[in-house]
Image (cartoon, rainbow, N blue to C red):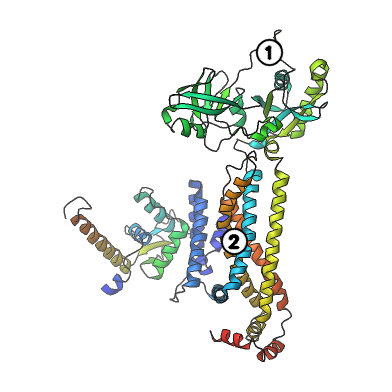
Amino acid sequence: VIDRLLFELALRCYPRAFRDRFGVEMREHFSRSATGKAGILGTTVLHGVAERWAAVVRWCFWPNHRHHMYAPAGRHFMFWDTLRSDIRFALRQAIRSPLYTGLAVITLALGIGATTTVFTAVHGVLLRDLPYQAPERLVMIWSDNREERRPRNVVSPGNFADYRDMNQTLESVDYVLSFMISLVMKDQEGLGRVTAVRAGPHLFEILGREAMLGRVYVPGDRDVAVVSHGFWTRWLGADPRAIGRRVTFSGDETLEIIGVMPPDFVFPYASMFDQWAQPGAGTADLWVPMPFEGPRWIDGAGQPIRNTHALAVIGRMRPHVSLDDVRADLARIAAHLEETYPATNRHWGTTVVPLADQTVGRVRPALLMLLGGVSLILLMGTVNVANMVLARSVTRQRERAIRAALGAGRWRLVRQALAESLLLSLAGGLLGILWSYWGVRGLVALAPADFPRLASLGVDGRVLLFAVMVSVATGLLVAIIPAVTFRRTDVRAALQDQARGTTAARGGSRLRD
Amino acid sequence: MDQLRVEAFLPLTPVAFEILLALADGEQHGYSIMREVERRSLGAVVLHPGTLYRALARLLESGLIEELDERPDPEHDDQRRRYYQLTPTGIAVARAEVARLTAQISAARQRKLLKGRA
């Protein structure tokens, strides 16, 4: 249904005569090919729209007045012809007063650029999905240390095992050692320092990501490592045959490399470990499975240890289960554990945090405040430019009066003003996008090192769309103030008044072109 | 046929030439033109509706093709379909274009860009 709607919209971009003649055929064509393969919609719609708009722009600036059966006619012709003359006039006005134009464009560019830069960060850090499958169903589970008021305390092996076995709301749940380990690689090419994460066997199943090369580890794998794309290019020369190679690390630990993750895969972000992350640990290069065994996990009596807390716990909620369900479920388990193991579990509850909140929750207020701040700067810039336009519009009163006297309606005058301010704001937007391209790098360089997700920031389609929308909104805002003043134009008074004034010469010269 | 009038259309755009080629075997409707072009080029050339019908409009206007009044196959008929065929001018222009391309190809042969006898 949406396909059809978009197609109809694309059809609207063609002149009516063309639509009347070919619309039926094109619809049939579309309905036949749409069933065939996916993706035809995008090309069809974009093709129609892009081609049509290219034709319009071409025709606006390089009109050929040869007769064409499907050229816009009548009202449509008027519309495009008016648009063309508005744009041409606006361009000439802009070129005639370069100082004014330059100031306005730079003011708007600064505002739009700053807003776009910060929006890039907001989009990249807060709005974009984490690089895991269905990330909205991922949660972090912490122990709530009520006595010491630490709601996000790392979890003990014993409690983890009970959460895993007793919960009814999680599809799967697993642990990650809450600190990354720096390993020295004893490679033939010298010593390299890499960062390893040790985690439970179900980690990749929970995150729902596959390896780019080779495979991820699964339960039962021992002495293997999945490596990051960065590790693969830096230390293995991006060699596809590196799968299966054995690498020896400090402590004479030899690991077989079984898979390479895609470049966009990052786990964990430092903020996922909350206060337990060691500063400057960087991103993980290796993921190594860590079995649930040994003296650190299980005591002499064969019971999992409850008095050492070292695990970060990540889980995937079952479909159609709400966060509150999970919280209630785990609170029930925690209460049960408090009763069963009073020595170790008294005053310990659980805290469940959505993974996205855990990752970027701390920086959200700061980023949003920054966005608010730059929006205000943009607003101030807009008002300033609107003031300039207003000041100029006083000197151009005579021009407007003449236009009105020649029969221009108010809408026609507003359209002219809109064309001028949109031209300014779009030029400012273009410059602003350029500027934000560097601005983003500056922002990344200035931000604290443990700021999550900044490394992958970039200007993408959504950011561009945002910038264009901001530019258009700015242009409209700039046009509104002078447009309101048009209402008060008294044609006769303006003509008589200004004919004697000093600006008459300028008005006259404008008339002559 | 006025030779000057034919030459005025040359060179044809690739899309226009594809359409004239597809119509050389006989009348077709818009969708089957697209299918034919796709089939002959082994999927390399796909005429999207926007391109196809704008090109058809241009060809119709310049009189290289025309619309059929009667419907060729009554069994598979569909009221929405319109059939197109080449006009004599269209045939002449297509021939002239082929001649032009042939001349180019033999020039390429002479300069050893293409294998085969010059």
Q: CA distance from mark 2 to mark 1?
A: 62 Å
- Where does label 2 land, which residue? A429
In the displayed structure, A59 sits above or below A37; it is: below
Residue A123, image x and y in percent? 63, 47
Tell me if label 2 and label 1 are in contact, CB under 8 Å.
no
In the displayed structure, A229 sits above or below B47; it is: above
- Where does label 1 land, which residue? A298
Q: Can residue A71 be spotted in the picture? A: no
Left/right of residue A31 with respect to residue B92 in the rendered view? right
Left/right of residue A81 with respect to residue B66 in the rendered view? right
Q: Residue furthest left?
A: B117
Q: Quadrant of residue A131?
A: top right
In the displayed structure, A12 sits above or below A77; it is: above
Q: Residue furthest top?
A: A301
Foreground of the two, A110 or A410 = A110
Tag 2's secondary structure?
A: helix
